[in-house]
Image (cartoon, grey):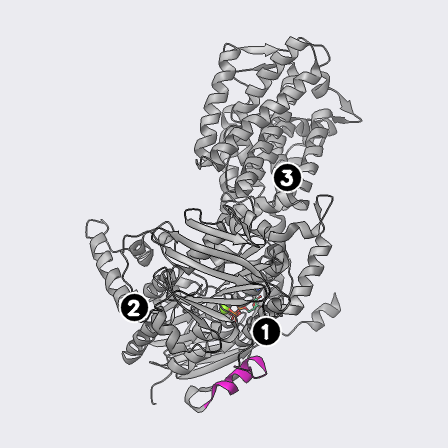
């Protein structure tokens, strides 16, 4: 390091180290925040570091994590998808019905994937072709999907009648539960999609400057439809896990507020609300941070009624930090 | 002059991420002078002004106003010191009305706290009228031509009673007569004791309006003095280290077959009865005043605008282009004007901006190969002399002119047979401008067909085989490049003259 210092002009070492620090912070603030929270949790409660507790946290965040990946993509494009929780329930209800009718797990999975991406496709159509603000379009979808799910299930739960369906979410590979592995694989896939393919490039471009993206010859409408369909697809993966876990889905209480948790994870992960800037890895750590917070509050017996308050606070702090840039 | 200097900037130093951008730069501006700040793209002009405007903090050095040390810790402080800043990139808010933009952050309110809308509109009209602009103050800015947006930016700075106005390339989208008006206004301001720091790459303007100059090169002060005693060539040499020929670049040569044929194209309220042809190897120029419809015309050709009547033929095939993508597939590209709004993706890196329209060139089995992208960028970096330390930083960190070069690289990479450049040299320094025009000429020599839209008559004269002049949405003249004179172009552009018969 000595030679670096000699090369440097007499000019401000202090200010250049400072700028390097701000750079480090701006690039890796989520990971730093994650480490800080992780260590704080470890100090505050010895049970936190227990390997079973750690695995438990991962298991608990896997569903929201998969949804949050999709949410990241929409939010990078400058949109938002409020319908994820409702679509998850809708997909769950329909696919369990399909499974019970045919007796095939394969049909259940296929139905889930098709129904989920189709719901997303409709969202995309409304946003891209109908020029409806994503907030409004997906709010409509949120209400509609939940309502149909409630109607079909008559307000109650629907249970699977095919043995073996629960294997999906309740088995494990080595020490990892299946849902956790699916979450990791999905993270890797979406990461590659966003950073190594043209689709990802286009998403960033249109989130940053839609007009310039269009004038660059990008089929903005198609990209948008693709984005919302992708969210739908990820939601259906989450729906399969959610349904398989208890072998049933409740039309009234499953998936409630998933959109908020997903958005929270994305925001904590450093993605900008208005689009164009953010990272998949940021969301990954954002999800983990949320998971640790939930876990800590449970370990420390914080009233469940207060947990929302803490979460809200964290989101606001995250946004305040983002604003500073 | 006995007046003490209004502004002294002393030994200013600034580095970004360890890369020095300003090295002990000093600048003195006295009351009532127009001071030109000159230098190549990336020399550090905007950075120096951003320091004066409180946008950036210097690493070293001091600023004195009227002999008193001032720390410009944020833009507000600078404003309170009587400094207004017209930034290089437009900062108007498209979704607000004209008057709302003008008074953004300093709205007039009545005693009860209500907005004084009519009063604001009145003042807006008044100040715009001084610049010769007649637009409804309640119009939404998004519906306005770029040149109007730039005029709004200027007016906004004039609104405040400032003692010093920084103008960072205020005329990049303005037509000749608008520039004239601006200069008149600047002379009046000067008489009333206001100082102006004027940044421009148009040396003719500098000679016409400025009293003194300071030249930066690679962040260092290389010269300062009075404009009167210098000729433009010496200043150019100071800036770019060589002199630039003013000769016509394009040599006469033969053209190939017609590649683009536009027949009786009209669009309500924008342009009408546009007919022209473009041949392989030909460079056409389109010029006129702001609001002449040429930008809209070519946006229609490119598929960005869809409401028009008439026929477009490419390579003798009738085409229906309703999306820019289809235009690219048909072999027609448009380099848009007003880069901040239409071309820059500010959150993408420099390299990714370059490759955005031609990602196919860098893909293998569906995955983008970053290495290939990087190599390609380095090719353009050399060819267009793009000044950038680390091409992985986002493009908005580049100096204005270098951003523009990246945009040009992006479209060169697309490599279509027909390329339309709309105001391609916006903010590009004299040396680089020459190089870019040479590039365009060599494109034509390689058999591409080129169209250049520009409000600067001298530019189109220099590089075009034929020049079309437009006035209020119509083509009023088709002139031969080597014969056209500036006056002639002007008289067609202002509608005072008009060709009797149409020439296809
Ligand atoms: N925020 C920033 N971060 C990093 N580098 C920067 C930043 N702003 C400017 N620079 C660098 O500083 C140098 C000077 O830029 P500046 O904008 O001052 O040039 P300029 O003289 O205004 O050029 P132009 O004529 O092209 O506008 C450039 O090399 C640019 O890349
Ligand atoms: Mg500049």
Local packing at callout 1 (Cα closer than 10 Å; few below 14, some 14-19, many 20+) is few
Numbered badge on residue A285? 3
Numbered badge on residue A187? none
Residue at label 2? B131
> Which of the two residues, A123 or B293, is positioned nearer the viewer here?
B293
Secondary element type, mark 3: helix
For the point 69% across and 64% down, the residue is: B379
Residue B199, position as x, y percentages in the image: 45, 74
Tell me if residue B239 is in the magenta stretch. Answer: yes
Tell me if residue A31 is in the magenta stretch. Answer: no
Q: Residue furthest right?
A: A174
> Which of the two residues, A242 or A129, is positioned nearer the viewer here?
A129
Mark with earlier residue (1, 2): 2
Direction from residue B370 to residue B296 in the image, left or right: left
* Rendered view: A163 above or below A290: above
Marked residue chain, label 3: A
Secondary element type, mark 2: loop
Magenta span of residues? B230-246
Residue A249, position as x, y percentages in the image: 59, 15
> Which of the two residues, B12 or B486, is positioned nearer the viewer here?
B486
Residue at label 1? B253
């Amino acid at each position: 390091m000595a030679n670096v210092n000699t090369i440097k002009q007499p000019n401000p070492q202090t200010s250049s180290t400072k700028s390097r620090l701000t750079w480090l912070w701006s690039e890796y603030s989520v990971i730093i925040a994650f480490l800080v929270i992780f260590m704080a949790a470890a100090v505050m409660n010895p049970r936190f570091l227990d390997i079973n507790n750690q695995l438990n946290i991962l298991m608990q965040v896997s569903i929201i994590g998969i949804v949050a990946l999709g949410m990241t993509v929409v939010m990078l494009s400058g949109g938002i998808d409020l319908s994820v929780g409702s679509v998850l329930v809708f997909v769950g209800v329909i696919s369990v019905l399909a499974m019970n009718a045919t007796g095939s797990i394969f049909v259940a999975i296929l139905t889930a994937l098709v129904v989920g991406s189709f719901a997303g496709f409709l969202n995309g159509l409304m946003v891209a072709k109908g020029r409806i603000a994503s907030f409004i379009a997906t709010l409509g979808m949120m209400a509609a999907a939940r309502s149909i799910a409630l109607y079909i299930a008559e307000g109650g739960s629907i249970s699977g009648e095919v043995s073996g369906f629960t294997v999906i979410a309740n088995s494990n590979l080595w020490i990892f539960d299946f849902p956790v592995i699916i979450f990791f694989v999905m993270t890797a896939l979406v990461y590659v999609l966003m950073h190594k393919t043209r689709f990802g490039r286009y998403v960033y471009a249109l989130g940053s400057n839609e007009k310039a993206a269009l004038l660059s010859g990008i089929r903005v409408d198609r990209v948008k439809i693709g984005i919302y369909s992708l969210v739908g697809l990820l939601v259906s993966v989450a729906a399969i896990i959610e349904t398989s876990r208890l072998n049933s889905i409740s039309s009234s209480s499953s998936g409630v507020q998933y959109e908020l948790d997903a958005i929270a994870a994305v925001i904590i992960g450093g993605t900008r609300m208005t689009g164009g800037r953010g990272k998949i890895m940021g969301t990954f750590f954002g999800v983990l941070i949320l998971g640790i917070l939930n876990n800590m509050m449970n370990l420390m017996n914080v009233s469940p009624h207060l947990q929302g308050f803490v979460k809200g606070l964290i989101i606001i702090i995250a946004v305040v930090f983002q604003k500073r840039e | 002059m006995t007046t003490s200097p209004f502004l002294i900037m002393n030994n200013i130093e600034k580095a970004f991420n360890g890369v020095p951008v300003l090295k002990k730069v000093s600048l003195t501006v006295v009351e009532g002078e127009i001071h030109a700040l000159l230098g190549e793209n990336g020399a550090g002009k905007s950075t120096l002004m951003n320091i004066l405007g409180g946008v950036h903090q210097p690493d070293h050095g001091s600023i004195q106003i009227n002999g008193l040390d001032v720390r410009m810790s944020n833009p507000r402080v600078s404003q309170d010191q009587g400094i207004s800043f017209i930034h290089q990139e437009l900062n108007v808010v498209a979704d607000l009305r004209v008057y709302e933009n003008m008074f953004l952050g300093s709205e007039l309110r009545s005693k009860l706290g209500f907005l004084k809308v009519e009063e604001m509109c009145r003042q807006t009209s008044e100040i715009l009228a001084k610049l010769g602009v007649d637009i409804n103050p309640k119009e939404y800015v998004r519906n306005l031509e770029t040149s109007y947006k730039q005029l709004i930016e200027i007016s906004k700075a004039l609104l405040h009673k400032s003692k010093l106005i920084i103008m960072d390339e205020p005329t990049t989208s303005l037509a000749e007569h608008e520039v004239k008006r601006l200069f008149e206004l600047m002379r009046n301001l000067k008489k009333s004791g206001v100082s102006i720091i004027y940044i421009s790459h148009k040396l003719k303007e500098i000679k016409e309006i400025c009293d003194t100059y300071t030249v930066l090169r690679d962040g260092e002060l290389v010269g300062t003095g009075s404009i009167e005693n210098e000729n433009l060539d010496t200043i150019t040499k100071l800036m770019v280290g060589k002199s630039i020929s003013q000769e016509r670049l394009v040599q006469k040569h033969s053209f190939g077959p017609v590649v683009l044929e536009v027949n009786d194209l009209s669009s309500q309220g924008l342009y009408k009865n546009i007919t022209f042809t473009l041949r392989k190897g030909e460079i056409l120029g389109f010029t006129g005043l702001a609001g002449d419809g040429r930008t809209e015309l070519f946006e229609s050709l490119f598929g960005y605008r869809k409401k028009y009547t008439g026929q477009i033929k490419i390579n003798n095939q009738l085409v229906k282009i309703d999306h820019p993508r289809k235009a690219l597939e048909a072999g027609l590209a448009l380099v848009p004007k007003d880069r901040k709004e239409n071309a820059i993706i500010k959150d993408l890196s420099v390299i990714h901006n370059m490759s955005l329209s031609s990602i196919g060139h860098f893909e293998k089995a569906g995955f983008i190969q970053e290495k290939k992208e990087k190599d390609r960028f380095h090719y353009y970096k050399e060819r267009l002399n793009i000044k950038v330390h680390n091409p992985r930083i986002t493009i908005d960190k580049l100096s204005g002119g270098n951003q523009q070069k990246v945009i040009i690289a992006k479209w060169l990479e697309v490599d279509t047979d027909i390329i339309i450049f709309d105001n391609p040299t916006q903010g590009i320094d004299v040396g680089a401008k020459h190089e870019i025009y040479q590039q365009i000429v060599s494109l034509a020599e390689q058999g591409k067909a080129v169209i250049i839209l520009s409000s600067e008559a001298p530019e189109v004269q220099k590089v075009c085989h034929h020049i079309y002049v437009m006035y209020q949405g119509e083509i009023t003249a088709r002139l031969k490049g080597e014969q056209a004179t500036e006056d002639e172009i002007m008289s067609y552009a202002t509608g005072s003259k008009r060709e009797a018969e149409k020439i296809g």
